[in-house]
Image: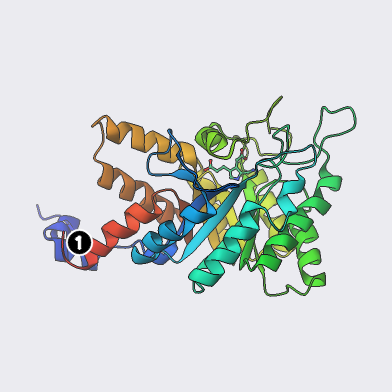
C-alpha cells in the first residue's frame, strides 16, 4: 500500500535537506561573552570553560580581532574589579574594567555592538547581586535599583549600545530606563534578563567572575526552575517597564519558556546558553564522548528553533568559524 506522505524523499541529499530546512543559524545571532579584569598583562584561562579566559584590557584587542574575523558582531562584557566592597561601587567606576573595555572597543571596532552586563555580584564583597539589609541577611531590592542605574549610566557614558541588567531586582528595567533617559541616553537599549532562573548551571561563571555568594544563595531574587507561568509574568513586567530585548536564561533546560515567550511577546528574544551548559558539552567532547561540532550546533539550533532571535553563547567564536567554513564550501 502506498503511503500518503513520504517525507524521506526530502532527506535524500544535502541539497534537498537544505531547501526544506526550517531553522538556520546566522553568525549575527551570536553574542560573545568576555570577562575583563583590572590590571595589566593578565590572560588567565578559566579551567571549566576551555577557550575562555579572564583578560586585562591589553589582551582585549587580539580577541576582538579574532571575533571580528569570525564575523561576530556583538559582545557582552563582564567586569572583575581588583577591589570589592559591600555596595559594589566598582560597578559604576568610570575607570573600572568594563567602562575601559567599552571605550577600547568603541575606538578599535566601532561597528561592534557592545553590551554591558549590569549587576553587582562581581563587585560586592559578599557576592550577592544587590546590597544587603543592615542585619546583613537579606538582599534589599529598592536600594539596589539606584546602584544598578548608576552602573548603567557609567556604561552608557563609556559608549555601550546596550545595557543588560541581570540582577533580577524588581523594577530594575524601569529604574535604568528612567536614569538613562534623564542622562540623555535615550538611544541606549536595555536587554532585560527577564526570566533568570536560580540555576546550578551558573557554576563555572562564578569561578570566571569570582562572584560566588559568600553566604546563602540567589533563590530570593532569581526564579524557581519549576515556574513557567511566573517566568512569562516576569518577562511581561520587563516589557512593560521598557525593555527593548527580553531574555530567558539558562537556555537548554528552559526551551519551553523560550518558545512560549516567542509566541507571546513582540520584542526580540535572547537566550543565554550559560557557562554550565558550555562546560558540560566541552567536558563530554574532551572525553571523546560527543562529537563536538555536532553537539555544539545541535544545542544552538535547538535554542533558535525554540524561538530565540539572539543567542549569548560561549561557543560564539567556534560556531561562527564553523559556519564560515560551511558557507565557503570548505567542509
Ligand atoms: C550576574 C550573572 C550571572 C550570569 C550572568 N550574569 C551569574 C549569576 O547569577 O550567578 C551567569 C552566566 C553564565 O553562567 O554563563 N548576576
The residue drawn where x is 84% and y is 28% is: 136
List the residue tagged with mark 1: 17
Q: Tell me which image quadrant ligand 1 sits in.
A: top right
Q: Nearer the viewer, residue 38 or 13?
A: 38
The residue drawn where x is 80% and y is 41% is: 87
Q: Nearer the viewer, residue 326 or 98?
A: 98
Residue 267, position as x, y percentages in the image: 59, 66
The residue drawn where x is 54% and y is 60% is: 269
Residue 131, position as x, y percentages in the image: 80, 39
Residue 31, position as x, y percentages in the image: 47, 58
In the shown orientation, is residue 3 left or right of residue 317?
A: left
Q: Looking at the picture, does residue 80 appear above or below residue 235? A: above
Q: Looking at the picture, does residue 63 appear above or below residue 178? A: above
Q: Image quarter for residue 181?
A: bottom right
Residue 178, position as x, y percentages in the image: 81, 65
Quadrant the C terminus occupies:
bottom left
Amino acid at each position: 500500500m502506498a503511503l500518503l506522505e513520504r517525507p524521506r524523499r526530502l532527506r535524500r541529499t544535502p541539497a534537498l535537506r537544505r531547501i526544506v530546512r526550517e531553522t538556520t543559524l546566522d553568525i549575527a545571532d551570536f553574542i560573545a561573552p568576555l570577562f575583563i579584569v583590572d590590571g595589566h598583562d593578565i590572560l588567565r584561562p578559566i579551567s571549566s570553560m576551555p577557550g575562555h579566559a579572564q583578560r586585562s584590557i591589553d589582551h582585549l584587542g587580539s580577541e576582538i580581532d579574532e571575533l571580528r574575523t569570525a564575523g561576530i558582531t556583538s559582545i557582552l562584557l563582564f567586569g572583575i574589579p581588583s577591589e570589592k566592597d559591600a555596595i559594589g561601587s566598582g560597578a559604576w567606576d568610570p575607570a573600572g574594567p568594563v567602562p575601559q573595555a567599552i571605550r577600547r572597543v568603541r575606538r578599535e571596532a566601532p561597528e561592534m555592538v557592545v553590551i554591558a552586563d549590569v549587576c553587582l555580584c562581581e563587585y560586592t564583597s559578599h557576592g550577592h547581586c544587590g546590597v544587603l539589609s543592615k542585619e546583613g541577611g537579606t538582599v534589599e531590592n529598592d536600594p539596589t535599583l539606584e546602584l544598578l542605574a548608576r552602573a548603567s549610566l557609567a556604561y552608557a557614558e563609556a559608549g555601550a549600545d546596550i545595557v543588560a541588567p541581570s540582577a533580577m531586582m524588581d523594577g530594575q528595567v524601569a529604574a535604568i530606563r528612567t536614569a538613562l533617559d534623564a542622562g540623555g541616553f535615550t538611544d541606549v537599549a536595555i536587554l532585560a534578563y527577564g526570566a533568570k532562573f536560580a540555576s546550578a548551571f551558573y557554576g563555572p561563571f562564578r569561578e570566571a567572575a569570582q562572584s560566588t555568594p559568600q553566604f546563602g544563595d540567589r533563590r530570593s531574587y532569581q526564579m524557581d526552575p519549576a515556574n513557567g507561568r511566573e517566568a512569562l509574568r516576569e518577562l511581561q513586567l520587563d516589557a512593560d517597564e521598557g525593555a527593548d530585548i527580553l531574555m530567558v536564561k539558562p537556555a537548554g533546560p528552559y526551551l519551553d519558556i523560550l518558545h512560549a515567550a516567542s509566541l507571546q511577546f513582540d520584542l526580540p528574544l535572547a537566550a543565554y546558553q550559560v557557562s554550565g551548559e558550555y562546560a558540560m558539552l566541552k567536558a563530554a567532547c574532551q572525553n571523546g564522548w560527543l562529537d563536538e561540532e555536532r553537539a555544539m550546533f545541535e544545542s544552538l539550533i535547538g535554542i533558535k528553533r525554540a524561538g530565540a532571535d539572539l543567542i549569548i553563547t560561549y561557543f560564539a567564536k567556534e560556531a561562527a568559524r564553523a559556519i564560515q567554513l560551511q558557507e565557503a564550501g570548505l567542509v
